[in-house]
Structure formats: structure tokens, C-alpha cells
Image (spheres, rainbow, N blue to C red):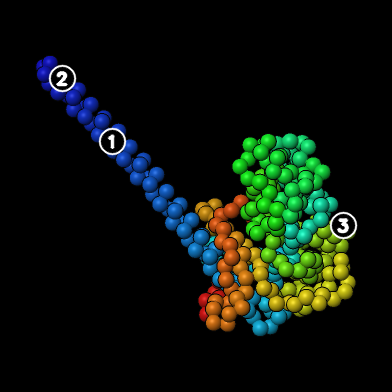
Amino acid sequence: MTKPQGMALVLVLWILSLLTIMAGSFALSMRRETVIVSGLKHNAEALAIAESGVALAEFMLLNPDQNKRWRADGSIYQIDMDNAKLRIRLLSETGKININLMELGLLQNILLRAPSGGNAQLPSATVNRAAAIIDWRDSDDLMSINGAEKKQYQEAGLNVQPSNKPLQTLEELQQVLGMDEATLNWLEPLVTVTADAPQVDLQLASKEVLQLISGVNAGVIDAYVAARVNSAKYNQPAPTSPLDPTPSTQSTDITALTIVSEVQQGEQATAVINALVKKSADAQAAPFQVVKWQTNRGTVSLFTPNMNPLVVRHYAESEFNH
């Protein structure tokens, strides 16, 4: 082989190697794009299913038969589909604790159970989050013991100060000195600023709320919640709460509630929607009006094992196709 022929062969081999590398890179890029597009497709499908779960919950709340109507006491309903599972949980706002009316002692006890661990997130150990909330919502500038008024916010380098009026939304808690996102996410299913009644409706309180306010043996609460779930399974009236043996005089008509709709599609995708809705007073309008709509906000999954006992009923998707 002559020298020019050898150089030509080397050149051809280099070109072939370069083309092989380019082809491999292109194939890898296409595989990655396919995975991304597939993931986006599954996420979009999951979100669409979660949205349909909110609409389905509103529809089931309109059932004229009170015993067959879906219950807004923390009960969970599951719809089984070919390639996904949908769980829907309804939480009446009257079954939550009104944070604008909560006394300091109860507020302190609740926050001590928050996942952030008491005062661990505070800029100063001398500031108490419960007292800071009280100072935020009261009408004066007098600081509670270990609370926080304008001066404490300035010292913490914050550009906000207490509004000195009741909280208008739960998101406003983000501005309270010492509050963190983990605590706020944990509080959202438990407290409200929407309920008009000063007292929690124990017939509609979720298991988590009952555990916070009752101070009774956990076994009593577990037995009551189990009986409540069982009554819903068999379309029977809900049992009277053992924490309040006097039959409830509050209206059974739900006027405001949070609907949590979560989809699980194997290992491919999941989506969750938290919707605060109010029943419309206008007969010509849609039955429910959306007050707040949150997508994929960090909350406790409805598919965790401790949620399984709260599942009232399993439906097949075909039951709603008509």
C-alpha cells in the first residue's frame, strides 16, 4: 500500500468514527426527548384526571339523598381506572379550626406538633410563633409575651409588619415571623379563615382535627372515625361524635369545603389539586364557585397507608361514564 493510499484509509476511518459518534449522539438526544415528551404527556393526563375529580366531587355533593351524598368530614373516595387511581378527599371548612378565633393555648399546642419542631425555625428563641400569630391578627401594637410586633419584624430584617386584623387567607401566615413552608403546608388541612361558626363542627371534623382539639384517648377517636366511615359505606346517617354527645344543630348543607383530588399512575406520574370551593347563592350560577385553586402543592399524599382506613368507597370508572 502506498503512502497516499494509507493516508486516505486513515481519513476514511476518522470520518466513519466521527459519523458513528454523531449518530450515537443524535440517537441519545432523541431518546431523551422522547422520555421528556412522554413524561409531559403523562403529567398532563394526570392533571386532567385530577381536575375531573374536583368536578366529580361537586356533582356528588349535590345528591338529594343526604345519606348517599359524599361526606366532607375527611372521608376519601377512590375511582379505579385502567391505568390510574384517583382519590378524592372532602374537608368541610366548618370542620376545621378557625385560626382567627383560636386561643393562644390551643394555637401553641397545635404548632408544637408541626413538622418543623416547635421553635426550631425561628430567628430568635425568644419569639413564639403562636404569640406572633396572635399579635398579627389583634388590633393593637402591644406585643404579647414572646410575641412579635413591628419592632421585631424590623430587627429580623423583614419588610412586613403585623396587619393588626384577622387573617384574610391562610397564605398570609407566610408573612408571620417564624412561619415556614413546611408548617404552613401541615396547617392547611387543619385550620381555616373561611368558617363563620366559632366552634368546630365535630360531626364534620377530620380525624387529624379531632386528634388536635379533643384531648381524649386516641382509641375513642379511631373508633368514632371508623364508625363514621362505615356509616358512609352503607349509606347510613353519620354517628354522633362522642366528643359532643348533643346532636348537632348545625346545618348539614356544606357551604364551603376543600376538595383534594390526587391521581396516581403507577410510577409514571402523579398530580394533586387542592381546591377551596363555596356553594353558590345564585341559582343561575354554577353550583360551586372556586375560591382557591392550587396544583401540586406539597401536602400529605392520599395514597399513604395511614389514609387507607379513610377510604369510604371504591368506584369503577365505568360507573360515572353515563
Judging depth in this view, the residue of 230 and 207 nearest the camera is 207
Which numbered disc flags the more N-terminal residue, 2 or 1?
2
Q: Which mark is residue 22?
A: 1
- Which structural element holds mark 3? loop
- Compare marks 3 and 1 and give the one earlier in the sequence: 1
Decide which of 61, 19 is in the foreground and name it.
Answer: 61
Q: Earlier in the sequence, mark 2 or mark 3?
A: 2
What is the x, y in percent for residue 7? Answer: 15, 20
Q: Residue at x 36, y 40 (%)?
A: 28
**Mark 1 burial class by Cα count in 10 Å: few <14, some 14-19, many 20+:** few
Disc 1 marks a residue whose amino acid type is Met
Question: Label 3 neighbourhood size at 10 Å, few (<14), some (14-19), many (20+)?
Answer: few
Where residue 23 appears, x then y in whole percent? Answer: 29, 38
How many numbered marks have been drawn onto this rendered protein structure?
3
Kind of residue at disc 2: Gly
Q: Residue at x 76, y 69 (%)?
A: 197
CA gap between label 2 and label 1 equals 24 Å
Can you see residue 78? no
Q: Residues within 10 Å of mark 2 (few under 14, many from 20)?
A: few
Q: Circle 2 sits in a helix, a strand or a loop, which is it?
A: helix
Q: Of tags 3 and 1, which is closer to the observer?
A: 3
* Cα distance in 3D space between marks 2 and 3: 90 Å
Q: Nearer the viewer, residue 133 or 109?
A: 133
| Position of the N terminus by quadrant | top left
- Report the residue marked by disc 2: 6
Task: Point out which mark residue 215 bears.
Answer: 3
Q: Going 82% across and 66% down the picture, which residue do you hit?
A: 224
**Quadrant of res 77:** bottom right
Q: Are marks 2 and 3 in contact (CB under 8 Å)?
A: no
Residue 161 at x, y = what percent? 66, 46
